[in-house]
Structure formats: C-alpha cells, structure tokens
Image (cartoon, rainbow, N blue to C red):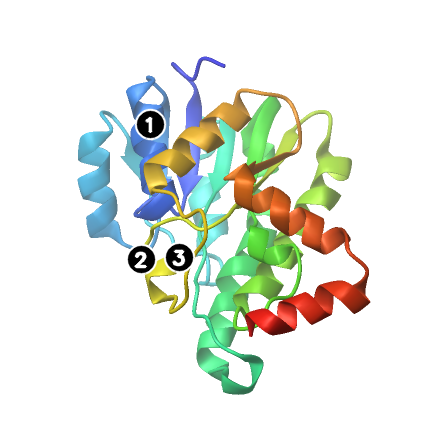
Amino acid sequence: MDFAGQRIWIIGASAGIGAALARALAGQGARLVLSARDATALSALAAECGEARIEPLDLGEAGALAATVARLADLAPFDAVICTAALYDPARVADLDPARTEAMVRVNLLGTLDVARLCPPLIKEGGQLVLFGSVAGYMGLPGGQPYSATKAAVNNLAETLAAELGPRIRVRLVCPGFVQTRLTAKNRFAMPAIITPEEAAGAVLRGLARRGFEIHFPRRFTLAVKLLRLLPYGLSLRLTRRLG
C-alpha cells in the first residue's frame, strides 16, 4: 500500500510506537494529525513530520475526544484512524492502586470505546480503524493487571467492530509483543523477543498494507503465546503459574 497523500490520525502519537509510526508515515508522504496528552512532545514530533497538525488530547478526560472529533470534521474523510494510546502500570491484583487502576481503565478501555463510537464517521468508505490491543490480552498472566484485562477487552472490542463496521470500514487489531518504550521500561523481568519502536512501526505498516484482521509481532513470540492460549486450562494455568 502507498501511504503517500493519505490522511491519517494517530491518537497516542507522542512516544513509543505511535511516534515511530508518525515518522514512518510522514516519510512516505502521509498527511498526519497527531494527538496525545503531551503537547510539547507533539510539537517536537510534528516538526519532524512536515505539515502534521497537532491536536492535544487526553482520552481519559470526559468529552475530550468528542471535542477533537468536532474540530477535525473539516478534514474528513480520513483514510485511517490509529489509536495507540494506553497507560501501563504492572502489578499483582492484591497490590493494585485504585486511582492508577481507574486511570488505566479510563484510557485503555473507555477511551478506546470512545474512539470506536466517535471516529468511524470521520473515516472514508474502505478506510481503516486501527486499534491497539496486545499480546498481553491473549490470556491472563501474573503481574500484568489491570493492563492485561483492559487489552483483553480491546481485543474483544475490535472483533465486535469488525463485524459491525465491515465492510464499509476495515477494522484492524494490532497486538504487539514486547517493544522498547517508556512503558515496558517499568518491567522488572526478562522480555523475550523485545524489539524497537521502529521495528514495531515497520511491522504495523506492512500489516496495514495487507488484508486481514490482526497484525501481531514479533511472530516468534506471539505465535508461542497463541499456542499457549490454545492449551486446555489445566495445562496452561500450570504453565503460567510458573511465570509468577
């Protein structure tokens, strides 16, 4: 797929995979709108991305996405809306901080639900709505809550949207494995097959250029987790307990 001239809105663009995607798409001539909470980081990124327009946005703030959608109506239709925004704070269930947990649910789940509800009217027929779930949402693993639970919900939501919005809009689910970002820097365990944000962005763009629903990477890791998910609970739960 040639992204030159395509109008694409990236939500969660200020760092990590979102920022790497913005740079890669700008390099191919896409016309970008960039959103995230950090307006300063967005401005710096926009300077690297040509004529990118910035729209600071906090998905966890009630009404913020609706106001942004209204401001972008004059740019519609979009070829794609890509939502990478997420919060991450790994912890065992017994150790959860209620305020941080609520913030994660508001951004990762309720924010993505708002994207699913409000953004499709901006997307052209045959365009793409791209939601970022996670391999962490494939199955429950120790220490990943509540992030894993929110991403399991996003994975499920994308499946629902693919049925509800298709074929007018192509819904795509992106499930990354471990990527070197400020979020995974919080982990205190070995992260197998970890890749850079630039490698992740390349995998996403290759996936968007193809047909299909899910884009997952790196496959040497994601396919192993998919296999684990297919095992009977009696076996898979014994294996995941060892990870704890």
Query: Position of 142 compared to 185: left or right?
Result: right
Q: Earlier in the sequence, mark 2 or mark 3?
A: 3
Q: Earlier in the sequence, mark 1 or mark 3?
A: 1
Q: Quadrant of residue 211?
A: top right
| Helix, strand or loop status at disc 1 | helix
Give the residue type at disc 1.
Answer: Ala
Residue nearest the observer in this picture, 110 or 104: 104
Give the residue type at disc 2.
Answer: Arg
Mark 1, other Cα within 10 Å: few <14 / some 14–19 / many ≥20: some
Residue nearest the observer in this picture, 97 or 73: 97
Picture coordinates of residue 116, whole percent (x, y): 61, 45
Q: Gap in Å between the C-alphas at discs 1 and 2?
A: 19 Å
Residue at the (41%, 38%) spot, across then down: 200
- Which disc, if any, is residue 159? none
Question: Which quadrant holds the C terminus?
Answer: bottom right
Q: Earlier in the sequence, mark 1 or mark 2?
A: 1
| Helix, strand or loop status at disc 3 | loop
Mark 2, other Cα within 10 Å: few <14 / some 14–19 / many ≥20: few
Q: Which residue is mark 2?
A: 182
Picture coordinates of residue 144, whole percent (x, y): 53, 68
230, above or below 173, in the image: below
Give the residue type at disc 3.
Answer: Asp
Q: Which residue is mark 3?
A: 58
Q: Gap in Å between the C-alphas at discs 1 and 3?
A: 23 Å
